[in-house]
Amino acid sequence: MTETTTQPATAQPPTRVAVSRRWRKIGNLLTAYSFIAPNFIGFAVFTLGPIVFAFLLAFMHWDGNNPIEWAGLDNFFKLFRDRVFIASFWNTIIYTGATVPLTLVCALGLAILLNQQIFARNFFRTIAFFPYVASLIAVAVVWNMLFHPEFGPVNMVLYTLGVDPKDLPRWAAGKDWAMITVIMFSVWKNMGYFMVIYLAGLQGISAELYEAADIDGATAWQKFWRITLPQLGPTTFFVSVMLTITSFKVFDQVFMITQGGPGTSTMVLVYHIYNEAFVSWDLGYSSMVALVLFFLVLGITLIQFRLTRENEENLA
Amino acid sequence: MSIDAMPAPAALKRPRRRVNWGLITTYVIVILVTLTMLAPFIWMISASLKLDRDVFAFPIQWIPENPRWENFVEIWTKIPLGLFVMNTFQLTIIVTILQLLTSSFAAYAFAKLRFPYRNALFLAYIATIAMPWQVYMVPQFVMMRGFGLTNTLTALVCLQAFTAFGVFLMRQFYMSIPDELCEAARIDGMSEYGIWWRIMLPLSMPAISTLTIFTFVTTWNDFLGPLIYLTKTEVKTIQIGIRMFISQYTQEYGLIMAASVVSLIPVLIVFLALQRFFVEGIASTGLKG
């Protein structure tokens, strides 16, 4: 780090040096803070403030208009009586539990596939990545039409393949299928992004390892399990943390595809926060649900950090 | 996995000709996967050129016999799509510029200057990166409402222009630029602002491109933010504008698809133009906004 304030004092009277030094120091300080201020003020007002507010609001009763009342732990105990919350809690866990490994495997598969020397490799990579940047509304609408239970092309194809009309999945409209539909959508939409991270990880593996394995006569399968996968450990850790956090925050696709239904079969935490806040205007309680989301994300991240460290220690 | 075939004639200067079954399998899988990724988009474009009653015709007619280009004319008059597009452009451009300026400015101080509480302030940024926005969106909304900013694009600008992610990304990049460069400039009498403008900004183009695309794409595609803040038609962005359109005209599939295609085009252009940086950016930072 550079130290801008200490420049060699030359043959000047000590008092003047001290004074000019002090001024320079203040000047430097003002310069530094002037660099930070534009962003930090916005950040403090619109992010830090609301975060503090959120933690307080979880222990209040407020409908947004009438005066705020202290609620103590009322909102906390309400969580256990609220069936929609309990459903949304478990649904979020189920969604995350399925989406994270599926996306991980698909992204890794795609990355290995598109890391080979093939024609128009970048073109294929771009396509695999595109669903991730495509606007969610547009693709969710298409998804809804493709998986329409009565006349969507997917069910039409299944029907022509000989599936009995009674057994055709109801997708977003079916109690048992709605969550699967949302999960499939998420995996399809996000795997391109994590593929790119894996591609970067694959490029970091030294070619010498594979050459040595070739000399020893290792099969492709052995090379995958013994070299690729262990070498990608840090990447996999990173991807799984990112994926877990994103999965806990799921909202958009649920809102667009199933609206949390049928019943509460795809109700998730953020959707419940949204409903409690902007439909029921129970701001205190919705902040309590938000707090649950926060601790869930925090907890999972800590556990994952811990597991990886143990893993690395075991390997070492 | 390869089978050696007959040796080729020496005139071809190839010692051997191999039918590489591994490679063929790879291509088959690649093409199948690509088609799965693309199918919804192709279906979308194809449906956007059809009559509503033909959209679900089976077997799927991938290339419509009589493409209905009128769909793309009609959507602009049926709903104020032009207005939505303008709103979204306005929002996206302001957010992107503000984000770039303020975060590269702050990042310079965090990376190259020394001042009290530097680490503490930076920690405040870092700590919020993992904090889901959904945790504090409700108090944030109440606060914005107090400022009288609901149903304005300003609210969304404030929401998205000062992210911890931007500062973090730029700072990481600036850390990789040698301090000696700044030191030399300082000895030459350049002010800190001059160093930022003349040295750091030009050197940080890769980071700037990454942040530009990230910000552009997230702002353009943002859904929950506009959904909460914008209830008046005049201020809606394209995402919730299309949603309104879908709920008003549930049966007009052709038009819905045409509107969806329109909403994808700007992102597609930005993405294709800057995708090289985008991929590099993800690979180096691995984060998203």
Image (tube, rainbow, N blue to C red):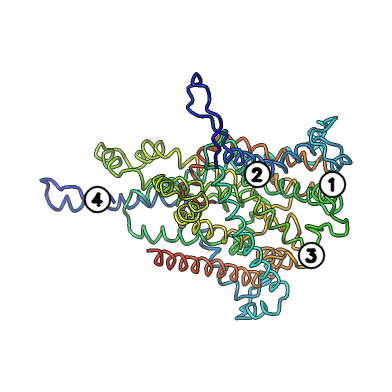
Q: Secondary structure at mark 1?
A: loop
Q: Which residue is mark 2?
A: B33
Residue type, label 2: Val
The chain letter under disc 3 is: A
Chain bearing mark 1? B
Q: Amino acid at mark 1?
A: Tyr
Could you tell me how far apart the alpha carbons at marks 3 and 2 are, in whole angstroms?
A: 29 Å
Where's the N terminus of chain B, which quadrant?
Answer: top right
| Image coordinates for residue B280, horizontal then vertical, percent | 48, 42
> Where residue B178 appears, x then y in whole percent?
31, 43
Report helix, strand or loop for mark 2.
Answer: helix
Name the residue beneath numbered marker 3. A175
Inspect the image, locate mark 3, and give the three-letter code of the amino acid beneath it: Lys
Contact between labelled residues 4 and 3, with CB atoms less than 8 Å apart: no
Label 3: element kind: loop
N-term mark: 3 or 4: 4
Disc 1 and disc 4 in contact, CB within 8 angstroms: no
